[in-house]
Image (cartoon, coloured by chain):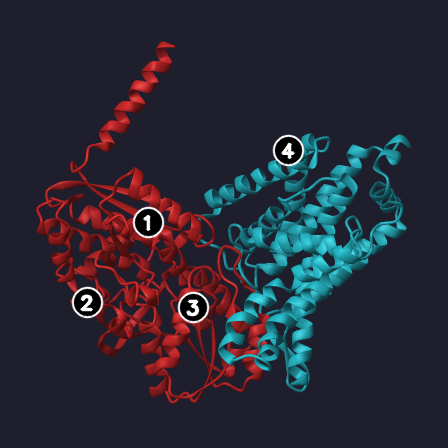
C-alpha cells in the first residue's frame, strides 16, 4: 500500500470528521439538553455558508466574511429561537420533527428567493489557497489544515466551556437532568436560548468552513444533517466528547471507504463489479457502524452521566 | 353557501376550459427547478420561452400551452410529474429531462400512453438502443457521444495515462464507457461518486487517489452544482500543475458565471468538447444567444440551446399536420427529418431518433465585455452517431 497516499487520506478523513464535529456538537447539545429534535440544524449550516459568501463578496476577504458571518449567524439563531423554536420545547418529538422539517423547506425557499438558484463560489485568500509538503510526496492544501486547526480550537474551547465554567456546569446538569436544574432555580429558558445560539454558530461555522471547498448552495445542509445524526447517535446523545470521537471515526471510515474499498473488492470480484459496488457499499459503511453500535450499546459510545 | 357554490362553478369552468382537447397544442416540460441544480432548469425554461416568443407562441396555427413541472432532482418525482402531465393535463408532448435516471424512470408514463417524449438533455444508452421508441426524440445527444469525442481529443494530445471521475448514475456510467470506447491509452484509475440530491461535493479522497495513480491527465463529468466545486478543489489540491484536465458538461455558462464572480481564473484557457458553442456561427444560434443574453443577462448553456431546439423540433412536427395533433404519424414523419432551424446548424436523425451531429473542441475565453464563456475552437468529429443505434429495431 502507498504510505504517502494513506497519510493524505487519514488527514482528509480527519478534516471531514472535524467538519462533522462542528455540526454534531451543536446538535447533540440541543438534543441532549433541550430534548429538542432539530432537523433544521443543517439549514443553519446553509445560512452560515450563504452569509459568509455574501460578506466575502462585499468585503473581498474570506477572513472578514467569516468574522462578520459568525455574529450574524448567532443573531439568526437567536431570532429563530425567539420566533419559532421556543414554542416547540414543550411539545413531543413528532411535533419537533414536523415543525423543523417545515423550517427546512421555508429556509431553503427563502435562500432561493434571496440568493437565487445558483450557488455562490467563495474564493480563498492567496495564503490559504496553497499547498504544503510536510513529508516527501504528502501534498496537502493549506486550507484543509486550517479547517483541522479551527475545529481543534473549537473542540478545545468547548471542552473548557463545558468543564471549567459555570455555564458549562449548567449545561452538563441540563444534559443529565433537565427538570432538576429548573427546580434548583436556574433560568432554563435563558440557558436554552444560549445553547441554541451556540449550536447555530457552530453549525454556521461548519458551513463557512466548507463553502470555499464546495460552495454555498441551497439544500446543502440536507444531506449532511443525516450524517450528523448518525454521529450523535454513535457518540451518545448530549455528549460533546462522544460527538468528537464519533465524528472523527465517521469521517475516517467514510474517507477510507471511498479510498480503498474498490481496491479491496477487486481482490475477490471482477474489476467491473468492484467499480460499481464499491461506491454503494462505501456510502453504507457509516450506517452499518451505527447499526452495530446501536446493537451493542444503544445509549451510544459515550453517553452523558446520570441517565 | 352562495360564495361556495360560486367558487365551485368557477373551478368547474376552469377545469372544463382546459379539458377541451385540440384547441391548443399542449407541451409539458419536466425539469429541475429546486435543489442546487435548479439553475439548470431555469436556463431551460428561459430558453424554451424564448423559442416560443420567436414563433409567436403558435404551432400549426394553434396557440401553445406550455406547462412546467419540477422533478426535484428525483426519478420518482419526475415520473409522478410526467404521469400528471400525460393523464391530467393530457399534453401532446412531454419535453425537458435533465437527468438520465429521471428520464428512464419517466419514459413509460409518456410512451405507454402514446405521447411524444422529447429529451432536451438526458441521453441514456438504453433509450438509444433496446428501449428506443418511435415516439421518443432527443434534441441533445446520446450520453456516450461527447466523451467519445473527448477521448479522440486526448489521443490527439498524446495522453497515455488517464484517471476518470464521474457521478455514480446512468449518465456517469455512459460517460465513462464513452471515454473508454475511444481513448487508446491506459486508464490508471476510476472513481464513481455519490449522486443525486445529496451528492458528494468534497472530492479530497478521490483527488488524492488520482494524484497517487501516476496519471498524466484526468477526465471528469460533473454537471450542474458539482462543476464549480470540482474545478476549485482540483486547483486547491495543486493538481493543475501535474495533470492535464479534460471536462465533459462540467464547465458551462452556469459554472463559469460563479467561477468568474469568485475570480477563480484557473479555468480560463481550459478545453472541453461539445456539440454546440455559444459562438457557433449560424444565424439561428446568433439570434438565440443574443436574445437569451438580452432577456436574462447570462450566456446560455447547452441545456438552454437544447431546450430551444426541442421547441423548434415540436413545431416542425405540429406545422406539418397543420395543428392536427391527433395525426401522430404525420408529426413523427416530419420530426424525423430534423428539418427545423436548429442552433447547431443542420443535423440528421438516426433511426433511434438521436442526432447524428458534429462535436467541437471549445475553450474558455473572455469576451469583449470581459465575461467568461466557452468558445468554439475546431471540429473534432463530423456526423457522429451513437454506438447503440444497432440495438434499436425501429
Q: Residues within 10 Å of mark 1 (few under 14, many from 20)?
A: many
User: Which of B212/B75 is in front?
Assistant: B75
Which residue in the protein does label 1 denote?
A: B109
Q: Do tag 2 and tag 3 residues touch (Cβ < 8 Å)? A: no
Quarter of the view holding residue B337: bottom left
User: Which of B135/B48 is in front?
Assistant: B135
Which residue in the protein does label 3 denote?
A: B172
Cα–Cα gap, marks 3 and 1: 24 Å
Cα–Cα gap, marks 2 and 1: 22 Å
Q: Residue B271 at x, y = what percent?
A: 37, 75
Determine if marks 4 and 3 fall on one subunit: no
Chain bearing mark 3: B
Which residue in the protein does label 2 denote?
A: B351
Q: Residue at x 19, y 52 (%)?
A: B314
Cα–Cα gap, marks 4 and 1: 41 Å
Dot 3 or dot 1: first in sequence order is 1
Q: Residues within 10 Å of mark 4 (few under 14, many from 20)?
A: few
- Point out which mark residue A241 bears: none
Q: Secondary structure at mark 1?
A: helix
Dot 2 or dot 1: first in sequence order is 1
Q: Nearer the viewer, mark 4 or mark 3?
A: 3
Determine if marks 2 and 3 fall on one subunit: yes
Q: Secondary structure at mark 3?
A: helix
Establish if B242 lies above or below B331: below
- Among the chains pictured, the one given cyan colouring is A
Q: Secondary structure at mark 4?
A: loop
Determine if marks 4 and 1 fall on one subunit: no
On screen, residue B90 versus residue A139, left or right, reads left
Amino acid at each position: 500500500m502507498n504510505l504517502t497516499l494513506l497519510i493524505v487520506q487519514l488527514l482528509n478523513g480527519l478534516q471531514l470528521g472535524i467538519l462533522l464535529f462542528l455540526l454534531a456538537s451543536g446538535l447533540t447539545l440541543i438534543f441532549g439538553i433541550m430534548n429538542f429534535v432539530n432537523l433544521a440544524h443543517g439549514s443553519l449550516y446553509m445560512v452560515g455558508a450563504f452569509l459568509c459568501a455574501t460578506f466575502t463578496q462585499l468585503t473581498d476577504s474570506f477572513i472578514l466574511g467569516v468574522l462578520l458571518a459568525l455574529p450574524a449567524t448567532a443573531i439568526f439563531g437567536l431570532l429563530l429561537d425567539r420566533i419559532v423554536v421556543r414554542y416547540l420545547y414543550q411539545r413531543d418529538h413528532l411535533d419537533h420533527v414536523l415543525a423543523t422539517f417545515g423550517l427546512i423547506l421555508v429556509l431553503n425557499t427563502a435562500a432561493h428567493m434571496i440568493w437565487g438558484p445558483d450557488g455562490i463560489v467563495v474564493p480563498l485568500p492567496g495564503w490559504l489557497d496553497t499547498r504544503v509538503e510536510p513529508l516527501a510526496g504528502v501534498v496537502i492544501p493549506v486550507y484543509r489544515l486550517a479547517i483541522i486547526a479551527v475545529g481543534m480550537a473549537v473542540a478545545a474551547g468547548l471542552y473548557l466551556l463545558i468543564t471549567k465554567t459555570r455555564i458549562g456546569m449548567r449545561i452538563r446538569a441540563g444534559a443529565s437532568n433537565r427538570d432538576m436544574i429548573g427546580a434548583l432555580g436556574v433560568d432554563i429558558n435563558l440557558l436554552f436560548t444560549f445553547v441554541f445560539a451556540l449550536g447555530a454558530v457552530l453549525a454556521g461555522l461548519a458551513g463557512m468552513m466548507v463553502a470555499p471547498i464546495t460552495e454555498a448552495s441551497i439544500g446543502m445542509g440536507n444531506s449532511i444533517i443525516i450524517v450528523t445524526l448518525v454521529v450523535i447517535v454513535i457518540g451518545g446523545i448530549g455528549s460533546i466528547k462522544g460527538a468528537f470521537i464519533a465524528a472523527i471515526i465517521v469521517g475516517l471510515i467514510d474517507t477510507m471507504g471511498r479510498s480503498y474499498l474498490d481496491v479491496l473488492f477487486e481482490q475477490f470480484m471482477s474489476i467491473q463489479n468492484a467499480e460499481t459496488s464499491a461506491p454503494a457499499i462505501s456510502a453504507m459503511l457509516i450506517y452499518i457502524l451505527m447499526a452495530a453500535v446501536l446493537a451493542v450499546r444503544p445509549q451510544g459510545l459515550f453517553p452523558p452521566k446520570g441517565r | 353557501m352562495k360564495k361556495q357554490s360560486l367558487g365551485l362553478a368557477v373551478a368547474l369552468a376552469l377545469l372544463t376550459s382546459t379539458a377541451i382537447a385540440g384547441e391548443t397544442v399542449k407541451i409539458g416540460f419536466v425539469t429541475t427547478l429546486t435543489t442546487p441544480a435548479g439553475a439548470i432548469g431555469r436556463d431551460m425554461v428561459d430558453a424554451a420561452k424564448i423559442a416560443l416568443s420567436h414563433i409567436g407562441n403558435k404551432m400549426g396555427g394553434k396557440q401553445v400551452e406550455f406547462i412546467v413541472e419540477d422533478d426535484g432532482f428525483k426519478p420518482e418525482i419526475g415520473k409522478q410529474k410526467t404521469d400528471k402531465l400525460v393523464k391530467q393535463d393530457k399534453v401532446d408532448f412531454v419535453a425537458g429531462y435533465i437527468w438520465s435516471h429521471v428520464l428512464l424512470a419517466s419514459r413509460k408514463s409518456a410512451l405507454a400512453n402514446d405521447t411524444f417524449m422529447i429529451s432536451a438533455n438526458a441521453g441514456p444508452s438504453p433509450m438509444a438502443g433496446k428501449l428506443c421508441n418511435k415516439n421518443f426524440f432527443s434534441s441533445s445527444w446520446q450520453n456516450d457521444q461527447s466523451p467519445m469525442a473527448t477521448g479522440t481529443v486526448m489521443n490527439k494530445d498524446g495522453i497515455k495515462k488517464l484517471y476518470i471521475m464521474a457521478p455514480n448514475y446512468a449518465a456517469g456510467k455512459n460517460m465513462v464507457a464513452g471515454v473508454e470506447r475511444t481513448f487508446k491509452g491506459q486508464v490508471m484509475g476510476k472513481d464513481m461518486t455519490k449522486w443525486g440530491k445529496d451528492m458528494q461535493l468534497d472530492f479530497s479522497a478521490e483527488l488524492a487517489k488520482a494524484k497517487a495513480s501516476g496519471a498524466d491527465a484526468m477526465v471528469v463529468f460533473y454537471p450542474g452544482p458539482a462543476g464549480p466545486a470540482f474545478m476549485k478543489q482540483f486547483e486547491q489540491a495543486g493538481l493543475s500543475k501535474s495533470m492535464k484536465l479534460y471536462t465533459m458538461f462540467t464547465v458551462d455558462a452556469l459554472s463559469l458565471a460563479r467561477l468568474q464572480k469568485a475570480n477563480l481564473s484557473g479555468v480560463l484557457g481550459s478545453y472541453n468538447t461539445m456539440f454546440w458553442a455559444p459562438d457557433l456561427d449560424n444565424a439561428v444560434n446568433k439570434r438565440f444567444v443574443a436574445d437569451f443574453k438580452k432577456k436574462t443577462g447570462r450566456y446560455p448553456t447547452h441545456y438552454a440551446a437544447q431546450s430551444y431546439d426541442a421547441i423548434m423540433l415540436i413545431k416542425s412536427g405540429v406545422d406539418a399536420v397543420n395543428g392536427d395533433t391527433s395525426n401522430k404519424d404525420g408529426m413523427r414523419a416530419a420530426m424525423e427529418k430534423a428539418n427545423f432551424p436548429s442552433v447547431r446548424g443542420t443535423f440528421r436523425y438516426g433511426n433511434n431518433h438521436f442526432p447524428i451531429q458534429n462535436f467541437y473542441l471549445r475553450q474558455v475565453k473572455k469576451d469583449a465585455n470581459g465575461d467568461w464563456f466557452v468558445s468554439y475552437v475546431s471540429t473534432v468529429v463530423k456526423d457522429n452517431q451513437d454506438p447503440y443505434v444497432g440495438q434499436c429495431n425501429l
